[in-house]
């Protein structure tokens, strides 16, 4: 019997507004191609180092490194504050209804994400945290998906055994492989229709 559902954050519950949209007004002399390439490079760097933002001080350092990376690439000074203000997350339309439904079925809901220590703040700002029982990030646990250790923290938070949990995420390597390595069943969500499910409402079919 499934007692808990774990969910990835970005690409599963939350959608990222492309940061170059808000940075555009600050960089009128930079071509769209160069701007997007620089932002994508910074995003790749952040994804690989998000777990290093363990507390306020180390998060500030991580954000400053990201800002320096994009500034050097474009030859234009972008502050960490400007970069952070250009990053906005919105919940997918199906996120809140699905969480509400799953919670109504008595399931524990925990977000499991490769993220810095701001994960809780982001979930709170999105309005989703009130439907969750908690969240574990790679920064807080010191374990980054696909390492199964992060799922161990989620299992402890949910108070259930691996075979009683189901994880939903959008990446085969991190989410599916990581969950299965921890003995947790996994569903791949692909909103283009190529995964196990294409919408969060379909989770209930696999409980």
Image (cartoon, rainbow, N blue to C red):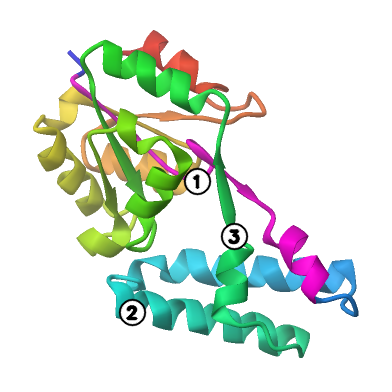
Give me the disc on residue 19.
none
Q: Examine the image and state in which quarter residue 72 appears.
A: bottom right
Residue 41's spot in the image, x, y percent? Answer: 65, 71
Residue hosting label 1: 10
Residue hosting label 3: 87
In the figure, is residue 71 to the left or right of 25? Answer: left
Q: Is residue 76 above or below residue 199?
A: below
Residue found 26% across the figure and 43% down from its top = 181
Gap between marks 2 and 1, in whole Å?
21 Å
Residue found 14% across the figure and 40% down from its top = 157
Disc with the residue nearer the chain's start (1 vs 3): 1
Give me the disc on residue 58.
2
Residue found 35% across the figure and 67% down from its top = 51
Residue 63's spot in the image, x, y percent? Answer: 48, 76
Instruction: Please state which of residues 62 and 156 is positioned toward the viewer in this rendering.
Output: 62
State which region is magenta.
3-26
Q: Is residue 166 above or below residue 206?
A: below
In the figure, is residue 5 to the left or right of 100? Answer: left
Disc with the residue nearer the chain's start (2 vs 1): 1
Q: Examine the image and state in which quarter residue 62 appears.
A: bottom left
For the residue carrying disc 2, how many other residues have a C-alpha within 10 Å: few (<14), some (14-19), or many (20+)? some
Q: Is residue 65 above or below residue 145?
A: below
Contact (Cβ within 8 Å) of mark 1 with mark 3: no
Q: Is residue 32 magenta?
A: no
Q: Examine the image and state in which quarter residue 68 appears.
A: bottom right
Which quadrant holds the C terminus? top left
Q: Is residue 4 magenta?
A: yes
In the figure, is residue 39 to the left or right of 9? Answer: right
* Element class at badge 3: loop
Q: Is residue 195 above or below residue 55?
A: above
Gap between marks 2 and 3, in whole Å?
19 Å
């Amino acid at each position: 019997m499934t007692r808990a559902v774990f969910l990835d954050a970005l690409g599963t519950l939350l959608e990222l507004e492309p940061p170059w949209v808000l940075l555009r007004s600050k960089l009128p002399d930079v071509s769209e191609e160069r701007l997007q390439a620089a932002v994508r490079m910074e995003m790749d760097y952040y994804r690989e180092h998000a777990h290093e933002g363990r507390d306020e001080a180390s998060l500030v350092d991580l954000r400053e490194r990201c800002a320096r990376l994009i500034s050097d690439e474009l030859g234009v000074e972008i502050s960490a504050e400007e970069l952070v203000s250009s990053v906005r997350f919105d919940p997918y339309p199906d996120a809140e209804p699905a969480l509400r439904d799953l919670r109504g079925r008595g399931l524990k809901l925990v977000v499991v994400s490769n993220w810095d220590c701001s994960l809780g703040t982001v979930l709170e700002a999105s309005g989703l945290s009130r439907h969750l029982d908690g969240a574990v990030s790679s920064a807080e646990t010191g374990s980054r998906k696909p390492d199964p250790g992060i799922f161990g923290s989620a299992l402890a938070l949910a108070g259930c055994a691996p075979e009683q949990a189901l994880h939903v995420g959008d990446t085969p390597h991190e989410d599916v492989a990581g969950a299965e390595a921890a003995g947790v069943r996994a569903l791949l969500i692909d909103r283009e229709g190529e995964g196990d499910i294409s919408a969060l409402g379909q989770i209930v079919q696999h409980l």
